Image (tube, coloured by chain):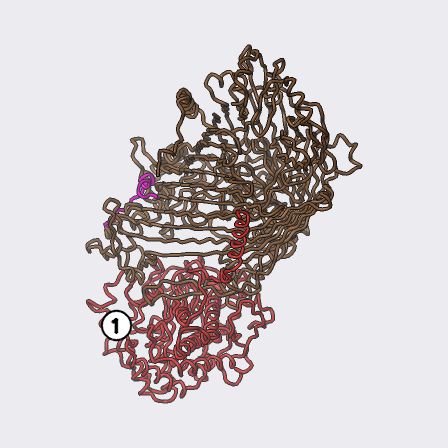
Amino acid sequence: MNFNTLNYGMPKLWLPTKLVLIMKLVIIMMIAGFLQVSASTYAQRVTIVEKHISLKKVIDKIGAQTGYDFLFNADLIKAAKPVSVNLYGASMEVALETVLKNQNLEYTISNNSVVIKAKEPSFLEKVADVFSRMDVRGHVTDEIGRPLSGAYVRTISGSVGYVTGQEGEFFFRRISEKELLVVSFIGFETDTVKPRENRDMIIVLKAKINRINEVAIVSTGYQQLAKNTATGAYSQPDMEIFRNRTGTNDIMSRLDGLIPGLTVTPGGKGGRGNQYSSTVGTQQSVVRGKSSVQLPLDPLYVVNGVQVPDLANINPDDVQDITVLKDAAAAAIWGAKAANGVVVIVTKMGRQNRPVRINYSGYVNFQGKPDLYHPDQLTSAQFIQAARQTFNPSVYPYNQQSFNMIAPHDALLYGIASHPNDGAYIARANASLDSLGRIDNRSQINDLFYRNAYTTNHTVSASGGSSMYNFYSSVSYADTHTSDIGASSKAYRINLNQTITPNKRLTIGLNTSLNNSVSSGLTPVSVSGTFLPYQLFKDPAGNNIPMDYMFGFSPETRANYQARSRINLGYSPLDELNRGNNHNNLLTINATGTVNVKLIKGLSFDGTYSYQKSPGTNNSYRDVTGYAQRRELLNFTVAATPASTPVYYLPTTGGTYIANASEQRNWTVRNQLIYNTNLRNNKDQLSLQAGQDVSENYVNLNTNILRGYNQDLQTYAVLNYAQLASGVFGGIASGRSQLTEKQSSVKNELTRFKSYYALLNYTLDGKYVFSSSYRQDKSNLFGSAQSAQKKPTYSVGGRWLVMKEEFMKNVNWLSDLGLRATYGVTGNSPYIGAATTFDILTPEVNTVTGDALNIGSMANNKLSWESTKTINIGLDFGILKSRLNASIDFYKKNTTDLLGSAELNSLAGTTTATSNIGRLSNKGIEMSLRSTNIQSRDFGWSTSLVFSWNTNKLDSYYVNPSIPTDADNRVTASNVIGYNTSGLFAYRYAGLDNMGDPQIKLADGTVTKEYGVGKVEDLVYMGTTQPPVNGGFSNIFRYKQLSLSVNMIYSLGGVMRRNANNFFTGRLTGSAGSFSTGNINAEFMNRWKNPGDEAFTDIPSYVAGYTDRRNTNYYTYGDINVISASYVKVRDVTLSYSLPPMLLKAIRVQGINVFVQGGNFMVWKANKYDVDPEGMYTSTYSLGANISF
Amino acid sequence: MKFKSYITLTLLILLGAACKKDFLNVVPKGKQVAVTTQDYNLLMNSSNFYVLNFAGGWQSIVLMGDEVAAEGSMFSNAQVVSQNAFKWEADIFRSTDIDWTARLWLEQLYTLNKVINEVQSSTGGTDAQKAQIRAEAMANRAFINFQFVNLYGKPYVAATAGTDPGFPIITTADITENNFIRNSVQADYDAVISDLNVAIATLPAAHAGGKTRFSKASAEGILGKVYLFMGKNTEALALFNAALNDNASAASPAVLYDYNTEFADGGKFVPMQYNGPNNAPGNDYNDVTESVLARSFYNYAYSGNGFGNDFLVITPQMKSLFGSSDFRLNFYAPQFPYQQENPSGRLSKYSVMYSKFGVQLSELYLLRAEAKARLNDFSGAKADVEMLRKHRMPVADATVPTAAMAGQKPLLQFIFDERLREFAAEGYRWMDMRRLSVDPLFAGTAYMHILYNDDVPNTTNVTTFTLSPARLTLKLSPFIMNSNKQFTNNP
């Protein structure tokens, strides 16, 4: 082998370029350092402002800005006159026209290259030309072969033009063979082709990716469809907003308010996500309302045609486009898992015949610290006052509190009670209480337990290609710096997408990616604003304050245990931080290969082969010095008296080290045949597709627990697990202690799916589209009884392209009009182990009587997956030459065989089992509207509005016979037949009586406070907690180099219960070990205190001890505490600035864009209690930049 | 050529993908289904059968025996179900309460019926192994059904048993089954006897898996008890003899702890801790020294589910049954759970966290003594009682007093008192109260419960509850009635 031939070398010519490169890198670092970043798109627009500059230079600039190659005779250009240009965002055609005006030159564009030549042919050429004229005929189609009627085909010299007919056909008589044909059509990229004689030329136009006009191609993961001929309900977000939304790196969160019918759920991540090792997961979301009651509601995620468990491994900067499949015609091809909708993501690819482009984007987003001031709690002074008022040592005697927390104020109050005649003691204790009332610990909590949170993401990408090979590759780094002290979470990603086209029959694609997420943390306690308000954590000298009371031993007990065990039982939360740590490391390697072979005319084979492997480790260490470890050790220490030598049954040094190793292996193989043909003399198009999809997910988990682990020596203690499992007697504080943990455990799980599917599309006369799909899924989840799985999913749909009709010819104000209607069935399959047709056994590890098996889930033969039938009717239209585009959809979804837990006949041996237990229906309206309001050279304004309305109703459902249908149960019930699945009920609150007890009004008008008197009809239905209306409203303004985008989201019509005071009995104190309890709602101050107060307040009185004379839920679950959850927020507002061309020229960079962004500002909310229905009280701010070379 | 090779390749791929028929026929590891005989054997080895470690078993009837009383300060904070049980309320459970007693045993019945119905067709075992596993499951089923009929059916009276409603006999493992009927008490007893007879004929004298598994000796012990409950004393005696013989011949037989040794220096139960002799078997369900068949239930403070005995003390009458040298008094102290002192000085059983209610050797001796006494073999009965007593107190004090030997009734009374001394506050008494109520010798006894309203010794501030005879038969809980509306509940 001769490696010397591997010459990627740079010719000497590049040396100065290298200098430029270094300069560019310096600039990146400077900008990234100060600002940090996001992306923007680069249309092939030309901006040049120059006076008296050589034509060569201008052409170089145009080439650099557009990526086109220029071919010309250097002498010819040198001889040209210098030019003055003044171009802002001009198309290349306009730019070329401008600079070549008055020159003796002309240009032709073909295949990403521009040829410039002398304008006037010689006489000889003219003669030859006459003889080389020819007749040219052909058709213009879109990428999937549909004829484009009304396209404009002209010769480049401009001498002849032709508007294509019904079938996209055109014809030119006797044009020069040196002519080129320029083909243009609204919504498509203009193409220039060389004419050919005597054959039917097919000119394929590429859909134009344009932000204001609808993106023309939708992807289902199986097919690419032209949106204006698709039958199903597809939605795509505004990708510019998506890319700029740097408040989060989570892909679903970035879609908030951008997709009609997609509601992103505030709060935790999870759902279908990676349940074994992922530290992140994907934000939950719901498409078109809840169509399931007990199964996860998250949509199915598909990346580059392959289903993935979550989107945590995808860098948002790598996303090319996103399509959300909503109705059956769109989603049924994903079968038994598609009832919740499908989110299809296509990552960026290189393009053919493009020079290599390098792009950097990065940002930093600041989130600050958690808000300790919401919800509103008692101040320390109020707290001490309330504690004095509610203190009741006869109802709560000291000797019954042996296992409860005695907080400092409790100790003082009990002290006062036990020294009734010691005036000096009482005065001292009162003074101490008063001094507690003067302390506010929240600034200490803020300083000592939290740090400022931020996230940052940096991506460097490169893309380019030749005619046979193209690629996109990116390297990125993301750092999620949470507010938890000592925590670290970082992700590193490398991505390479390649396409190889060795000949015209074969296309090979290869997407490879490598993700590594590394996180670690210490063991801080999590202190919230609801903790005891006066308890400080550090004294003025900077020492950690001991808080030995936190875990509920009385001082006497603690002293006794400490003396016997010789284990220190002191506690201070700040000491705990470094007494343990966690380290997670997850590597995900993904490779997806695609092959497309054109077999015979119209028929091609398409294969997708994907393999993903993700090994991960999750290790934690807890040192024996940690309080929980000391307490555990205490339970395993036997010492009858302080004099006896303690016997320790667990190690007293080192710590507990838990090592989890997980590995997931998923693969998918898809083979399909695709057949496209034209029928009836090209009047009709038929497309058929059929294939098989096979996938396997394998998970393996190993856990090892090492006790007495020495981190430095990596040694551990060998324990007698058999003895520990049968119990240690006489343990201090426990009597008998048992350690049932398994030193090591192994678990593996295998899930397999096998599916067959077929797709059909038929277009009649270019006006009527019919589509259909069919799929059958089988899996091993239900044991081997596959007969239970013969339940196919299918869809049918149609579209009428009204504008193509004869009678619409003269309607000029309408630029597009389409009507869609679809029907179909999709499924929702339970997770593994949810139900089986066999008794599934689970192992029991028992060191005393030997290992055993238990029945983990009992067989249920009468089970099938949930199925959802969807009807969708849609209307798409564009008016005023597509200045305004809109889509409206109406749908109705009926879900049957809802899976859920139902109580069975208890005599049959189980109380509940997963069963098919009900039906529900959803209906809704969705609308998206995009309009270009103003479009001029310096100023632009565009608006988009996304609206969705959904309501659902539970038509039938299992009713648990053991739960009485009375008001007290219904008021907290969800899933009530005949109501929305998120319905909310409340008591009709009727104020307080003269004892400060809450009363309700019954249906018959009676006012009562009697416990348990309410019937279902005495409640009032307040509405739904799932807001029926939501969506987004975006405005983008551009002024010269500045752009401002304001994206609002809204959520209307929902209700929620507010956090009213619910402290009406019991001791005012925290619960042992909890740093989030202690304080109570500030409204407690306004409670009923004396007869007559009922005239001013609705808040019930405090009563020490249990009483059945009243039910305080009448207040907390009363209608007065149900408030509207409607709100409008600015999700993000972004101001960005693109550097002007003059500056770019000086630093030889193609484009620099910097921006600032703010997120999460409340605009309006329909409640007066200052409650954020999303619970996100803090705003976030970002800075970012995007640089392209 | 090149073009053809593409087509060939494509066809090969399509063909390759189409085969592999067994692709979906895999059962994920860690989630297996029962196939081999060993799988069924392991199912029978489940700890669910031998320890009800948080609720269930005899928890409720512990609170209903007449040897216990309640301390008011703890009673008022107790769970409503526990209060109801103590007060002998007709409805112990509210409709939302889970009846763990029935629930846990019904879950076990599912597994047992699965084993009984399926083990014969399992693979990899001999016919003898399969028969033994099936017999063991049947014995277990009989044990549970015997509990059910004694909770929810009237005490056995031969004349009316054929019409007294009992508990459904469940023989299938199918969660969708819905057509249950209440079989008669007689049918229940017949089913129990039939299952146990199969077990006795098939099981080995002792199970190789230890005393948590059914053996011939334990099946004989249970069947003897069943016959004694039916008044068939001769049959019962024969089975008790067989059970004791088979136990004695086992490789590691059940033996009695000698408290004279265990409470002496160096004994197992010393030193006494703040919670008593906590090395005694009452704190360890794995200590099966005295068990022929080990079955335990959680009998301590409220665990978060089921009942709790937090408020329970023994009555002064019960306390007076103990002789001063009886070591069994060491298991009592004026102390509530979690080492809280009881200022009234009344005693609680404070070192039994798990009560054993399978076949205890001590009970076998007492049951055989009872059978002998009923068959007028007084000296035989005396020998059996003393066999136990001399392991519980100094030998000098172990002799049955002369007064007790005066006749059948005083001797039986002494034996029942001995049962109380051995098993107070562990649920045995309720079963005895039931059968004594239909025993002509003892009929007409009135039972009362005392709730002490003050935490002081010898208080007179008490509330009393009287047991009406109907309450000896528990009502089926809403847990069962809700899904079986066709049942007529007990009055």
Percent x, y for residue B173? Answer: 51, 70
**Residue in front for this viewpoint, A26 or A222:** A222
Q: Given the image, on which type of amino acid does mark 1 rest?
A: Tyr
| Residue named by callout 1 | B259
- Between A1073 and A599, the one lying in front of the other is A599
Percent position (x, y) of residue A976? 62, 53
Specify start and end residues of the magenta stretch as a single range.
A566-582
Chain B colour is red
The chain holding disc 1 is B
Left/right placement of residue A1126 relative to residue B423 reads right
Q: Is residue A175 magenta?
A: no
In the image, is residue A839 above or below residue A143? below
**Residue that lies at the very extreme toward the top in this rendered image:** A52
Q: Residue at x 59, y 23 (%)?
A: A92
Residue A169 falls in which quadrant of the image? Answer: top right
Horizontal and vertical percent position of residue A491: 41, 38
Q: Tell me where residue A100 sits by quadrant.
A: top right
User: Tell me, what hue is chain A?
Assistant: brown
**In this orientation, which residue lies closer to the viewer: B116 or B399?**
B116
